[in-house]
Amino acid sequence: MATVEESAAFDCHLFDLDGVLVDVEDSYRRKIFDEVGEVTGRHYTDRQIKELWHGVGGESREEILRSWGEDPRAFWRVFDWFDAPERRLEHTYVYSDADALSSIEGPVGVVTHSPRELAIPALERADLLDVVDEVVPCSYETGYKPDPAPIEICLERLGVEGDSDVAMVGDSECDVHGAWNAGITGGHVDRIGHPVPADFRVENLRELPSLR
């Protein structure tokens, strides 16, 4: 398993999008969950918002929702209605270290739970659209991380061979577990002070093993 200390280089890098390359203002998250709560009849605490948005406390967001007594599909239908791509983009900002991707050699892919109509404009805002070679949005058809299917789809589209050394960098357990389920290295970038078990952990994308 690769560690930062080993300064390992990877043949291919995959990244999650939200919480890794871009994020949204805290006030926007609060507003969306308040609006969702008006439909579901629930009040979501700041802790619950953090748990679900950043995938803290469960291998998957579906698992987190079920622990609250929510039906994941019903919840996401309501959530996506309010969290429309054009609306979220108004409150999206780019992490300052996202430009580290431009220094990476080899194929770069993004595997994200965001829909394509949000992911592509967000990557444009981050000035990364020409850097990223493939974008795979997760869905109920492709599967959601930690299901390895969307990661495997991305690698196939990138033409990455099975014996290549690949790293998936995310901000949640579902990203790391998705990487492990796909048989690749799982890296964690800790944006909120909540480290999760991973093959390597960094606080800044410029600390990635391949860039050291």
Image (cartoon, rainbow, N blue to C red):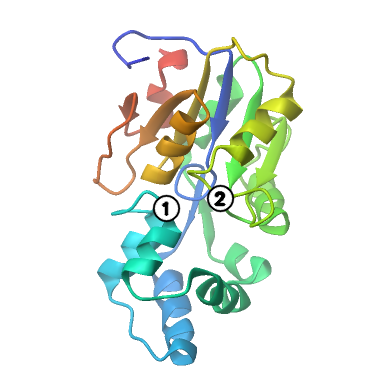
Confirm whether residue 172 shows in the render: no
Q: Quadrant of the C terminus?
A: top left
**Closer to the N terminus: mark 1 or mark 2?**
1
Q: Residue at x 41, y 75 (%)?
A: 70
How packed mark 1 is, by other alpha carbons closer than 10 Å (few <14, some 14-19, many 20 or more), is many
SS state under label 1: loop
Q: Position of residue 192 (x, y in %)?
A: 29, 49
Q: Position of residue 161 (x, y in %)?
A: 67, 14
122 displayed left or right of 208: right
Q: Which residue is mark 2?
A: 144
* Amino acid type, mark 2: Tyr
Is 104 located above or below residue 117 in the figure? above
Q: Residue at x 32, y 60 (%)?
A: 51
Q: Position of residue 195 (x, y in %)?
A: 25, 40
How packed mark 2 is, by other alpha carbons closer than 10 Å (few <14, some 14-19, many 20 or more), is many
Is 158 located above or below residue 97 in the figure? above
Q: Which residue is mark 1?
A: 60
Confirm whether residue 195 shows in the render: yes
SS state under label 2: loop
94 displayed left or right of 160: left
Q: Position of residue 10 (x, y in %)?
A: 52, 13
* Amino acid type, mark 1: Ser
**Picture quadrant where residue 49 is located:** bottom left
Q: Residue at x 60, y 35 (%)?
A: 151
190 displayed left or right of 131: left
Q: Are marks 1 and 2 in contact (CB under 8 Å)?
A: yes
Is 29 located above or below residue 19 in the figure? below
Q: Residue at x 54, y 35 (%)?
A: 15
For the residues marked 1 and 2, what is the alpha-carbon distance in whole angstroms? Answer: 8 Å
Nearer to the camera, 43 or 93: 43
